[in-house]
Amino acid sequence: MKKLSVDLGERSYPIYIGQDLLSSANLFSEVIRSSQVMIVSNTTVASLYLTQLSESLIEYQPRSYLIPDGESFKNLSVMQDIVTQLLENKFSRNACLIALGGGVIGDITGFAAACYQRGIKYIQIPTTLLAQVDSSVGGKTAVNHALGKNMIGAFHQPAAVFSDSKALNTLPDRELVAGLAEVIKYGLIRDEAFFVWLEENIEGLIARDTACLEYAIERSCINKAEVVARDETEQGQRALLNFGHTFGHAVETGLNYRGWLHGEAVGLGMLMAADLSCRSGWITEDKLQRIGSILQKTGLPLSLPDELEYADMRGLMSVDKKARDGELFLVLLKDIGDAFVTSQFDEKLLQFTVEHFTSKASGD
Ligand SMILES: NC(=O)c1ccc[n+]([C@@H]2O[C@H](COP(=O)([O-])OP(=O)(O)OC[C@H]3O[C@@H](n4cnc5c(N)ncnc54)[C@H](O)[C@@H]3O)[C@@H](O)[C@H]2O)c1
Ligand SMILES: [Zn+2]
């Protein structure tokens, strides 16, 4: 088992990565200081892992609250149901919530913990690759509003993160590969050596080799923890984590969040950002090819869906959160392992990039 730390002064917390952590009763008792514990999960994940987790928490006689599976349940009404459960069970400020699931469960449970009696403790037990390498670390919590994703939220750090690599065995292939996009992101934005390791080990990751997966989770969490420790509330450097996301969010919004997974949209978004970086003369053709090649090996989709053309994409990109005062800021690459934020890109080159990835253009 590996133990990392997110260094945030008195809000610092450990990340444990290993096998069978769901059964690690002794580790849980190091973190939980309350007799009031509630596990929040969804019906899919609970049917796989709730019994195992409840057994290791037996001394707390944990309650559980299950929500249906899906992003559409990450909303205020479900969050209020969680709060109602806490109130009905007379949970105090000293209580502890446990998020057992992917990013949807982590985000809504974290937000409920941030709000209940102005903030109670919670633990992240992420069960998707995306949640293990990204959403469980860093304290961003949120629910969706009908008018926008993640529009109601708070920064609230967990008390600990337990990433059990064995839980990934049941994850559908498509979800695993979508998580790999966020893993590759860390290599591209700030860790060239990790990118080289990923180039050499991508087949092992896709084949779910445990050692490969645990190393990738560890290295991703180290990178995320470093960024978060320097810029907890996204005033500067944390924005680099949005590499590929302005393009990706445009795809997700353009498709009404149906059809493509977040990581799939980010995978294509990263390739588009790399393509624009190359057209702008910031990275070489050779580096762009290496990025294209690793993404291709994952099987992530690498051209835009039929219904999205340049005008749609450009319109959607300018409503992205990163468009400040009407000016579009993009995270681009100066090198593999070196990203920067800029609004100083050539609009015409952006158009060429987007057009290059439209379904009509692909196959050229
Ligand atoms: N807070 C953050 O910093 C942050 C960062 C990135 C993404 N997010 C959020 O995370 C969410 C996406 O997370 P996600 O990709 O984990 O999706 P998800 O939580 O919807 O999980 C994906 C699917 O996998 C299933 N699943 C989960 N674990 C499983 C397992 N071990 N075995 C089998 N099936 C399993 C889930 O039930 C679901 O059907 C979005 O809401 C996004 O906004 C948050
Ligand atoms: Zn993402």
Image: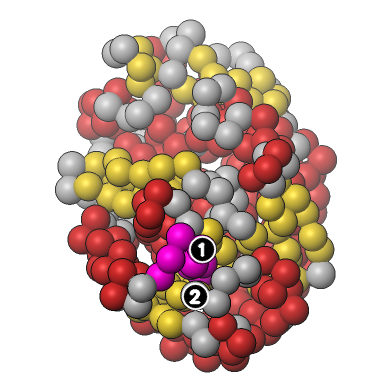
- Count residues near mark 2 (Cα–Cα under 10 Å), then give few for <14, some for 14-19, many for 20+: many
How is the model colour-coded?
Answer: secondary structure
Query: Which disc, if any, is residue 36?
Result: 2
- Count residues near mark 1 (Cα–Cα under 10 Å), then give few for <14, some for 14-19, many for 20+: some
Magenta region includes residue 92 = yes
Tell me: residue 152, above or below residue 315: below
Tell me: residue 2, above or below residue 65: above
What kind of residue is marked 1?
Asn
Q: Nearest the camera: 242 or 196? A: 242
Question: Which quarter of the rendered picture does the N terminus lie within?
Answer: bottom right
Which of the two discs, 1 and 2, labels the residue nearer the N terminus? 2
Tell me: residue 324, above or below residue 320: above
Q: Are marks 1 and 2 in contact (CB under 8 Å)?
A: yes
Left or right of 149, for residue 163: right
Q: Residue at x 51, y 15 (%)?
A: 342
* Magenta highlight range: 91-98
Residue 127 coordinates in the image, percent (x, y): 55, 70
Q: Nearest the camera: 346 or 62? A: 62
Residue 324 coordinates in the image, percent (x, y): 36, 17
What kind of residue is marked 2?
Gln
Left or right of 96, for residue 312: left
Q: Secondary structure at mark 2?
A: loop
Query: Which disc, if any, is residue 94?
Result: 1
Q: Examine the image and state in which quarter residue 338 appears.
A: top right
Left or right of 361, for residue 52: right
Query: Which disc, if any, is residue 290?
Result: none
- Label 1 and label 2: CA atoms lie apart by 8 Å
Q: Residue at x 27, y 27 (%)?
A: 319
Q: Secondary structure at mark 1?
A: loop
Question: Which quarter of the rendered picture does the C terminus lie within?
Answer: top left
Q: Residue at x 57, y 71 (%)?
A: 34
